[in-house]
């Protein structure tokens, strides 16, 4: 597995998480309200995007996005 890539678009208020190279994106599919799955040519999920990630109040409060990683 490639390195996990996490991008926060402050202006668009979206969080994108990639499990592999974003250049492999072929199609996007809406999975749920505000959640988009990104797939490669074989239909494998290679990332996802969370729209409306922070509420307007949270956007004003945060200079950075806290991330917790747990290895199990």
Image (cartoon, rainbow, N blue to C red):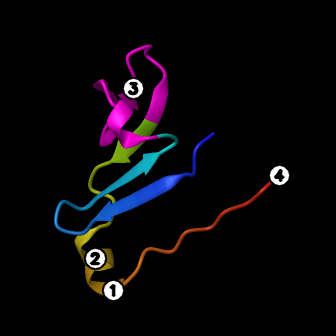
Look at mark 2 in the image and give the residue it sits on. Answer: 59
Residue 32 within the segment the image draws in magenta? yes
Q: Name the residue under label 3.
A: 39
| Nearer to us: label 4 or label 2 | 4
Q: Distance between the residues labelled 4 and 2?
A: 31 Å
Instruction: Tell me which corner region of the image, top left, top right, bottom left or bottom right, holds residue 37.
Output: top left
Residue at 23% across / 72% down in the picture? 56
Looking at the rendered image, the disc whose residue lies closer to the viewer, 4 or 3, is: 3
| Front-lying residue, 11 or 1 | 1
Alpha-carbon neighbours of circle 3 within 10 Å: few (<14), some, or many (≥20)? some
| For the residues bearing labels 1 and 3, Cβ distance under 8 angstroms | no
Q: Which of marks 1 and 4 is in front?
A: 4
Residue under label 4, please give it: 72
Q: How far apart are marks 1 and 3 (CA)?
A: 33 Å
Magenta region: 21-46
Q: Is residue 12 visible?
A: yes
The answer to whether marks 2 and 1 mark residues whose Cβ atoms lie closer than 8 Å is yes
C-alpha gap between disc 1 and disc 4: 31 Å
- Mark 2 or 3, closer to the camera: 3
| Vertical arrangement, residue 55 with respect to residue 4, above or below | below
Query: In screen coordinates, is 63 left or right of 19?
Result: left
Can residue 32 be seen here? no
């Amino acid at each position: 597995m490639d390195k996990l890539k996490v991008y926060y678009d402050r202006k668009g208020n979206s969080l994108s998480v990639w499990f592999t190279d974003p250049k492999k994106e072929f199609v996007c599919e809406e999975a749920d309200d505000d959640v988009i799955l990104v797939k490669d040519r074989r239909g494998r999920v290679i990332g996802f995007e969370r729209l409306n990630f922070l509420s307007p109040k949270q956007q004003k409060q945060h200079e950075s996005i806290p991330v917790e990683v747990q290895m199990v």
